[in-house]
Image (cartoon, rainbow, N blue to C red):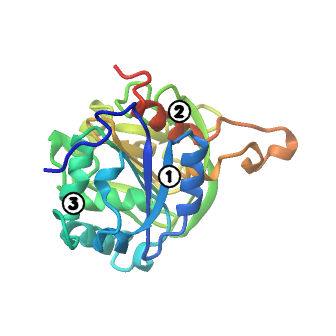
Amino acid sequence: MYRTPFSSQPARARALVLTGYGTNCELECAHAARQAGADSVEIAHFADLIEARIFLRDFNFLIFPGGFLDGDDLGAAQAAAQRWRYSRPRTGDPLVEQLLERVAAGGLILGVCNGFQLLVKLGLLPALDDAYLERQVSLAHNLSARFEDRWCHLLANAQTPCVFTRGLSRLYLPVRHGEGNLIPQNSLVLRRLREENLIALQYVHPDTGLPTEEYPHNPNGSPLGIAGLCDPSGRIFGLMPHPEAFSHPTNHPGWTRGETAPLGIQVFANAVRYLRGEGRA
């Protein structure tokens, strides 16, 4: 068992952004974490973990960015999930055990787009009944049968335990993916996601503000308009939209017309505040 760091120090947020094998949003995620006030932010290639040049135990905020891991061969993040499940660094426990230890120690994990696909394929989300590493949902090809690149209106669930969406209501963020249609293992899983408030984020119709499965407001056809899930602890969060891509007012597609919306950076800021002990229950 690894030691739990930071116990004798003031609460700090130390973020690690993982990259390699097709990830392409690591710089934006690192920038967002810095903007959100993280005390330290590092970017590391997966190989750095295998070669023991860097250790998960030294971080309490792990970020899996978007991209196209392994070219989406065999399905988005499918190969990467096997890499994480079975890899062991030169020194230390298997990486997947290190991931679970970080969560058990109170750390946070964020997966954006391809990172979300990795978390569900690895079984870290939604982890019903705390069954981590058991795949209960997946993310399949968009029902539109095309790659979707557009901005979407989103609703954060006020009843969710999700750390990352606390205090948030409506968001407006871009999506850019070909495989974002959430497929539950069965109807019971879908019902429990709703009843246990693990649906942290939903696509909504801009006119009604209600969750929708209508295209293009729901760009991939996810049931119940699911755009993001958390685990029962609320400390693992995955979403298809890109909060790191809205880090400045001028990122908004209508900024020259005076249009605005809450910055996606708030998702990262909530994580930093939590790790510093601000607003914990």
Residue at 58% in and 48% down: 32
What amino acid is at disc 1? Answer: Val
One can see residue 217 in this view = no
Q: Earlier in the sequence, mark 1 or mark 3?
A: 1
Q: What residue is pinned by disc 3?
A: 96
Residue at 39% in and 32% down: 11
Is 270 located above or below residue 236 in the figure?
above
What amino acid is at disc 3? Answer: Val
User: Which residue is nearer to you in this view: 167 or 217?
Assistant: 167
Residue at 75% in and 37% down: 260
Report x, y in % for residue 225.
Answer: 45, 44
Q: Are marks 3 and 2 in contact (CB under 8 Å)?
A: no
- Secondary structure state at the residue bearing disc 2: loop
The tag on residue 210 is: 2
Location of residue 274 by image quarter: top left
Q: What residue is pinned by disc 1?
A: 41
Q: Of tags 2 and 1, which is closer to the observer?
A: 1
- Secondary structure state at the residue bearing disc 3: helix
- Quarter of the figure that contains the C terminus: top left
Left or right: 153 with respect to 16? Answer: right
Alpha carbon separation for disc pair 1 and 3:
21 Å
Location of residue 129 by image quarter: top left
